[in-house]
Image (cartoon, rainbow, N blue to C red):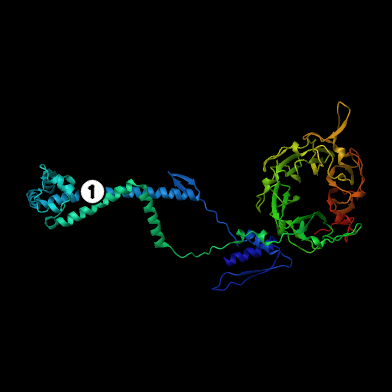
Amino acid sequence: IQTTLMERIVDSIKEERIKDISDVRNESGRDAQTRIVCELKRGADPAVVENQLYQFTPLQSTISIMNIALVNRQPRTMTLKQLIEQYILHREDVITRRTRHLLHEAKKRAHVLEGLIYAVCDIDEVIRIIRSARTREEAINKLAARRFRIPASHEHAPKIPERLMRVASSADGVLMTRVQAEAIGAMRLIQLVGLEIERLTGDYAKVVAEIEGYEKILGDRNLVLGMIKDDCAEMKSRYATPRRTAIEESATDIDIAALIQEEDVAVTISHNGWVKRVPLDTYREQHRGGRGIKASDLHSDDFIEKLFVASTHDDLMCFTDTGRVFKIKVYEIPQMARTAKGRSIRSLIELRDGEKTVAYLPIKDFEKGEDFLCFATAMGKVKRTSLKLFQNVNRAGIIAIDLNEGDELIGVTSTTGRDHLLLGTRHGMSIRFNEDDARAMGRSAAGVKGIELGDEDRVVGLVRIEMAGEDDGDAADPDLALLTVTENGYGKRTALSEYLVQSESEAGEVSYRAQSRGGKGRIDIRTTERNGMVVAVRAVTEEEGVVFVTRDGLLVRTPAAQISKIGRNTQGVRVVNLKEGDRLIGAAVTPASEAEGGDDEGVEGDEIGES
């Protein structure tokens, strides 16, 4: 076991499934308990490493037992309780059949003893009949035809059971049965002569007592159950051995959260999936106009895409393009220095080959009934599901949305039940609708149509618009705008009110409302030959920054405020100067602290080096 465990730990380290172990030693003695020492790297979280050892090595094993048994000659899979119940029924049947057999044998024995008692009381006549017979069969027939009478004055009468005397002392006497005659005929004369009435009556009394006991058992189920208990106790006393394994409180029975100090931390997640947490006081408070501080020392091919404040006891939900969701505790994210790169998200969740994360959501409370998760897929499906349904997510992940073949999850956002959702497509269309237009559905449902797509069109972005009050009222953040970027380096910011539909009442009053879910939507940006197709649709404020990613491996960072804010159904302006043949493949909004630049100046246009 030690060798296998060591080998699996080493293999997991080589495969980079466990990255924070620097050395492994087997310090087990010949007579001592097993002792394997794992030295951790600097900054490693022991709780995370322990969980990885449980997950990727035989340090903790789960043995599944399938309880299959034949019930009425049919195989059935049963629970432990059902198995015990069937065992009891089986033991009842065995004891009942055994008792019936013993009762039958005892009655046969009593019947033979009765014949022998009759014979001993008139032994001279029995011997005469046997001697006068020419054959054994003739002797048996004569004995079976003979009536035996035992008068009350007989010397053995006081020793004979009362029940037998009532029959044998009658005027007609008792006729011996053939079974009794055969038992006498099978005995030698010397055996007949040697029979003692005391021994016969004693044996007969014992057999009668046994018969009464068997009949009592067959008539009382509680006695049968008592015998089952006695049998189990006997087996326990006969075969019980001291327990060889110790039952201790395992790590899985301990609430790790109770051992972690609850505090607010800053969590950063990079575009390439590097995650870490740092104490919140690491980001010192600055006056207006401050330069900010560097949040991470990432390579030139990466940037901070998510930065949020959460408690160490909060959950972080990670959604993938295949529609799966994982849940980890914030305290499981390694705490590192402010400028550290972090750890790959793949070391914390089990992603399949080719699977990538598309959304991260920190959750403090799953019990809020008004909170929902809204999903959007590339083929235009949307789904709204109560947050409570995602409370129990195991480490292997669960299905968050059922995707059709060829579809993929492109975005997930949390909503309050009163928000608006906006979908943007590759062909420059957009639709804004009330989230409650999509009824709440189950966790594994596929969703409903969010937008009617044209030929070869796909959804590229999902935006949540938090409302200030009424469903068709103003957005909670009036500075929030929609950023749209095309593959040829053009883009724009547009006020979210532009995506409402204008309507006029009979009195001539003009109002604005959201569109209806499932429609074709309205033109957001013109996808002309100059612009190309849309590659990203994001919500952005003027304080945030934008990072553009090109196909040739360039990152271009710019403050969102420098991107022109113009109307809907326009071509936009140039936001990135691309080399000939290069194309934009995406854009991400970075936190305000990253947009300021901080210590990370001069990165605009940096080329991504190959690893």
Picture quarter containing residue 298?
bottom right
In this view of the protein, can residue 117 be seen by the observer? Answer: yes
Residue, disc 1:
108
Res 273 → quadrant: bottom right
The quadrant the N terminus occupies is: bottom right
Q: Quadrant of the C terminus?
A: bottom right
For badge 1, the amino acid type reads: Lys
Can the viewer see residue 185 in this picture?
no
User: From the viewer's perspective, is 137 left or right of 595?
Assistant: left
Q: Is residue 526 above or below residue 82?
A: above
Percent of width and height locating residue 79 = 50, 49
Horizontal relation, residue 33 to residue 181: left or right: right
Who is closer to the viewer here, 313 or 582? 313
Front residue of 284 and 340: 284
**Local SS, label 1:** helix
Q: Determine the residue positioned at 90% across, 40% down.
A: 529
Q: How many marks?
A: 1
Q: Where is residue 106 in the image (x, y as percent from the top left)?
A: 25, 50
Residue drawn at 69 percent across, 51 percent down: 326
Residue lying at the far top in this picture: please name it: 506
Residue 488 place in picture, x, y as percent: 89, 45
Q: Would you call the spot at circle 1 few (<14 residues within 10 Å), some (14-19), or many (20 or more)? A: some
Q: Where 89 falls versus 500 (above or below)?
A: below
Q: Kindly identify the residue that appears in the image at 91 percent across and 49 percent down.
A: 561
In the image, taking residue 536 as reference, residue 103 lies left or right, namely left
